[in-house]
Image (cartoon, coloured by chain):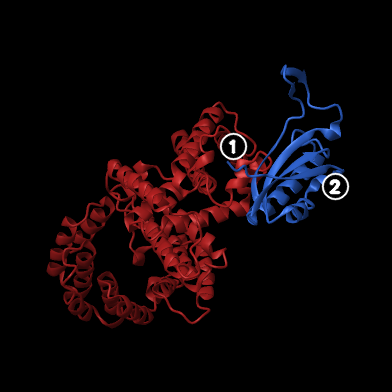
Amino acid sequence: MAEQSENKVNKLVDHFFRHESGKMVAVLTRVFGFANIEQAEDIVQDTIIRALETWKYGKLPDNPQAWLYRTAKNKAIDLIRREKIKHKIEGELAPLLKSEYTLVPSMNEMFGENEIKDSQLRMMFACCHPTIATEAQLTLVLKSLCGLSTKEISHAFLTNEETIQKRLYRTKEKIREEHIPLDYPGADSMPARLDTVLKALYLLFNEGYNSSHPEKLIREDLCEEAMRLTILLTENPSTNLPHTNALLALMCFHASRFNARLDDKGFIVLLKDQDRTQWNLFLIERGNQYLSIAAQGAAIHDYHIEASIASVHANAKAYEDTNWHLILELYTNLFNRTQNPVVAINKCIALGEAEGYEKAIAELNKIKTLTEHCYFNTSLGEMHLKAGNKIEARKHFQKALELTSSHAEIELICKKMSSC
Amino acid sequence: MEKFMYLFRGGMDFPHSSSPASQAHLQKWMEWMSRLSKDGLFVAGEPLSKAGKRVSGTHKVVTDGPFAEAKEVVGGYLIVNAHDMEHAVEISKECPIFEVDGHIEVRHIDTISM
């Protein structure tokens, strides 16, 4: 019991530091300039270390957040005063940071609530600058905005620490060479940049929701971070667009199922078997709200459709009450827009429920491009099982088994096979 | 754009004090300088310690403290961009030092030709 609660405390502490470190890096990068992001990260790192050293002797400050901010602020002021970075600071804040009259008041302002939000938004846009490769964008967001360690990031991407470190190093070099500023994009480039940011957040959420790490299926933290950052976007007028809200709705609906997705042994529970009393009604309600905000305005984005599909599931009281015809319609629409083969698979699953499994099997067999994909094979297996073709089902489940390294997925497939 | 220097004399003894009144006054300076910075007029500036040394004459005699009268001591300086002296004077009038009966000496920064 003691170990369990210690674990819980450690998780909370990790979460707190991760959360705050992301905010502080954003603020200090704004102060020092994007090119000097390393210095910002170093100061934040030192601050966290200092906190861990000072607090472990039981002397927790009344306001830990304020303690962190004050410490980071003072370190930054110190650095500026010691001329170590003064000459490198550029931009509209520079004159105020270089004068004793305005150094401390400016730094205090930068650590104000609104400024912190502003800095994080700028960070999001800067990290998703078009000259930075997509993979690198996500890595940078995870490192700088979300406060993940290179180890945690390497787990999320199923690669090694060295690869992540190299990627970060190269990206920072690029930022310096291209003089990428920590600014909002101009009105012309804003729509495209926002789309990139949203895509990164979508990937981030997805990474947390379907973590490819073999040991943990759900990384709640990644999902939470993705949602937190998307909420920030909805709080800013120039980024609070219908499809931003649609994405947030989608995230809410998925996140509402967290507690029901895994059983107490850590095995996957499929949607149809989930205990819907475990679904987070608050999140579903939020999802509904965001979706209705998203519905205002004429433009339809893929996120609208995905969110609508999720909404149909989320608002069904039981699996049997699911409106499969509507879902089929939505997936058909989505597939026409994206030509995405995974969407095609989902469409077939809906087709199976709405119009019969043999039909779905026929449609699935038409998809040639994903025969080596685990999901394709589990879907085919499932359809065959439901249609009563146990031998065919077993064949596909066996294939699926070879195509995944996730323990949770392996467990699930084995369970399926035992009913063949 | 030309460069001008403001020499601040008199007024409140801040930012060395941490009393609420001083903090409020400092905040006004921050707002004034922020505005200047946003308009691209702020170049540099620093507060000066009231105590100091005076080094004089051919014999380089060193004495304590600059002046006898508190209101004569230069408390700090600011370098600004301005179109001309008139403009520089206009900008200076926004300074909070006048609320506490201080003064500003406005001087043009000359270029020296070889």
Chain letter for the part of the structure drawn in red: A
Amino acid type at circle 2 is: Glu
Left or right for B40, reference A392 = right
What chain letter is assigned to the residue under label 2?
B
Task: Residue at 53%, 68% (x, y): give it.
Answer: A240
Q: Position of residue A119 (x, y in %)?
A: 54, 53
Left or right for A152, reference A29 = left
Left or right for A302, reference A233 = left
Chain letter for the part of the structure drawn in blue: B
Amino acid type at circle 1 is: Ile
Q: Position of residue A277 (x, y in %)?
A: 47, 62
Please say if A418 is above or below A347.
above
Neighbourhood count class around disc 1 (C-alpha, 10 Å): few under 14, some 14–19, many 20 upward = some
Task: Residue at 33%, 47% (x, y): give it.
Answer: A170
Q: Position of residue A175 (x, y in %)?
A: 40, 50
Residue A147 or residue A308, whichever sits in front = A147
Residue A380 or residue B56, whichever sits in front = B56
On residue A142, which mark appears?
A: none
Marks 1 and 2: in contact by CB < 8 Å? no
Q: Position of residue A99 (x, y in %)?
A: 64, 41
Q: Which residue in the protein does label 1 denote?
A: A77
Quarter of the image for the C terminus of chain A: give it: bottom left
Q: In the displayed image of the protein, which residue is found farthest to the front? A: B114
Element under disc 2 = helix
Q: Is residue A8 visible?
A: no
Q: Which residue in the protein does label 2 denote?
A: B99
